[in-house]
Amino acid sequence: MSVRVRFAPSPTGFLHIGGLRTALYNFLFARHHGGSFILRVEDTDQERTVPGAVENIIEMLRWVGLEFDEGPHVAGPYGPYVQSQRLELYQQQVQLLVERSAAYYAFDTPEELEHMRERQRRAGIAPKYDRFSMRNSFTLPPDEVQRLLAEGAPTVIRLLVPLDQEIRFHDIIRGEIAVHSHDVDDQVLLKSDGFPTYHLANVVDDHFMRITHVIRGEEWIPSTPKHILLYRAFGWEPPQFAHLPLLLNPDRSKLSKRHGDVAVEDFRQQGYFPEALLNFVALLGWNPTPDRDIFTLDELIASFELNKVNRAPAIVDRKKLDWMNAQYLRMLPVDRLAHELQPVLHSLNYPEFPSEYVARVIALLRERVDRLPEIATFGDYMFVPPRHYDWEYFRKYWHEELPAWLEELSAVLEHLEPFVTERLQQRIRQFAEERGQPLRALVHPLRLILTGKSVGAGMFETMEVLGKAECIRRIRIFLTEQLPTIAEQMRTA
Ligand code: GLU
C-alpha cells in the first residue's frame, strides 16, 4: 500500500514554525517512500476560520519548496479537501454509529452542561460528560427521544465510550500508549448546527482519503484514544500514528511570540532564506547525522526516518537559525543573492546599481552578516557615500599632515592601474613608507573617509569594489566638506 500522509491545518491564522515542522515531516516521509502528500483544510470550527489563512499556508509552504500532490488548490481523487464541503459525508457516517449504538443523541442545554461541570468541580472530579445523569438517549424514554428529534430540538451526537476498557495504540515515535476508557470523554461528534467536531471529521477523512500515517504534534495524543474508538466503531483499520515532540523556547516555556517571531511569514520578511528556515525546522526533533547541520532538501528526504524522531521536546534556538542562515548566505550563488537584494536596495531608496556591482558587494560582505538584507544596512556605504562618520575612531588616527597626504594620495590613486586589491595595497604601503609612516596611519583614516565606519571588509578589497572614481570622489567630498570644520577641532582637542 503506498504511503499517503496529510497536513491538516485549521485555517485560523498564519502558518507557524510548528505547523511548518509538521508539514515538513509529512512531506519528507511521503517523498522518502514515494508516497503522496495531501493538504486537507480542517475548517469545521467556522468561528475561528480566518479568511486568507489557507492561501497563506499554501504560499508559505511553496516558498520553502513544499508542494502538495492533492489538496483544494490542486484537486485529486479524494476531494473535496475542505471539511466544510464534506458535511453530508460526516452526517451520514455519524448516523451509522448511532444505528450501531456506538454514538447517541444528547439534548442538554449549555446551562445544563455548565451545572454538570459546576457539580463536578465542587466534588473535585475531572470534568467529563455524565452519560447517566444528563438528558440523552440513555436517560430519556425512547418515545421522548423520538419526539425531541421530530421536533427538531437542539441535539448533538456523542461518542459512546465503553465503560471499562483499555484503549491502546502504537505510536511510531513514542511506542505503546494505553489509556483507560474511564479517562476518555463522551466526545461530541456532531454539533447541533450539523457541523462535525474535529474528531469525527478527522477520522472520517483520514479513512476516506486513504491516509496511511497520521503525523502530527504531540498535543493531539489525548485525542487519539477517541479516534481509535471511532475507527473501531466504524470497523475501519486505523492509520499508523506518529506524534512529533513539542517545540519550546530556550527557557523551556511553550513556544510563543514573546520570544520572537513564530510565523513563517515574519521570517520571510526579515530576509531569512527558505532553505535555511527549512533546514533549521527539519532539525527540530530529528537529525540525520550528529556531525552535520547543513542539509539540502534532497538529503533530508533521503535520510528521513520517522522512528528516529526524538521524543524529547525540541528547543527553538533563534541564534542557531541566524547561524544557519549565515551559512546559506555564504553558500548560495551571488547572482541569486544580488537579484534578491535589489528590492531591498530599492526600498531604502538607494540609486540603481547593476547586478554585477551588487553581486560584488555581496561577495565582499557576506561573511560579516547573518541575513542578506543586512548587507544593505551594514554595507550602506557601498551604495551611498557615508552620511555619518565615526569621529572617535578618526581622532585616534588624526595627524597634522593628513589633509596634505589625502590630497597627494588622491593624485596617486588617479593614476593607479589596474585599480585592484593587490596594487592598492602595494601602492598605499609605499606611499606611507615614503612619508615615514606605518600603513595603518593611512588605512584607518581612509576606511573612515570611504565608509564612515571603523569596521568592515578588508580596506583594499572595499576600495577595489567601490572603484577608482568613487574612492576619489569620497576623498574629495571629505576634504572639501568635512575637513575644514573638523581639522580645527582635532587640533584643539
Ligand atoms: N486540524 C488539526 C490542527 O490544526 C489537525 C490535527 C491532526 O493532524 O490530526 O492541527
Image (cartoon, rainbow, N blue to C red):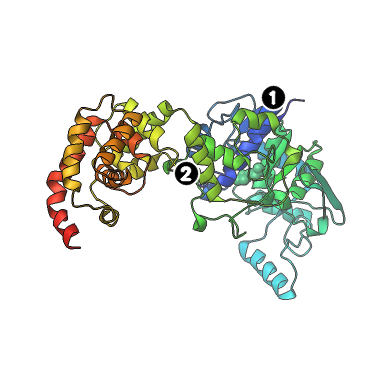
Q: Is residue 9 visible?
A: no
Task: Give the position of the C terminus as an image quadrant.
Answer: bottom left
Residue denoted by label 2: 267
453 or 51, nearer to the observer: 453
Give amino acid for label 2: Phe
Locate residue 340 relative to residue 349 in the image: left or right: right
Residue 394 x/y as whole percent:
26, 53
In the image, is residue 161 above or below residue 5?
below
User: Which residue appears at 16% of the width and 55% of the height?
Assistant: 486
- Mark 2, residues whose alpha carbon is within 10 Å: few (<14), some, or many (≥20)? some
Q: Is residue 491 visible?
A: yes
Task: Give the position of the N terminus as an image quadrant.
Answer: top right
67 or 282, nearer to the observer: 282
Residue denoted by label 1: 34
Give amino acid for label 1: Gly
Locate residue 279 relative to residue 237 in the image: left or right: left
User: Alpha carbon of mark 1 to alpha carbon of mark 2: how far?
Assistant: 30 Å
In the image, is residue 490 above or below residue 21?
below
Residue 447 x/y as whole percent:
29, 44
Taking the image as four quarters, which one is ligand 1 found in?
A: top right
User: Which residue appears at 85% of the width and 56% of the height?
Assistant: 163
Secondary element type, mark 1: loop
Q: Earlier in the sequence, mark 1 or mark 2?
A: 1
Do the numbered discs 1 and 2 sit on residues whose CB atoms are within 8 Å? no
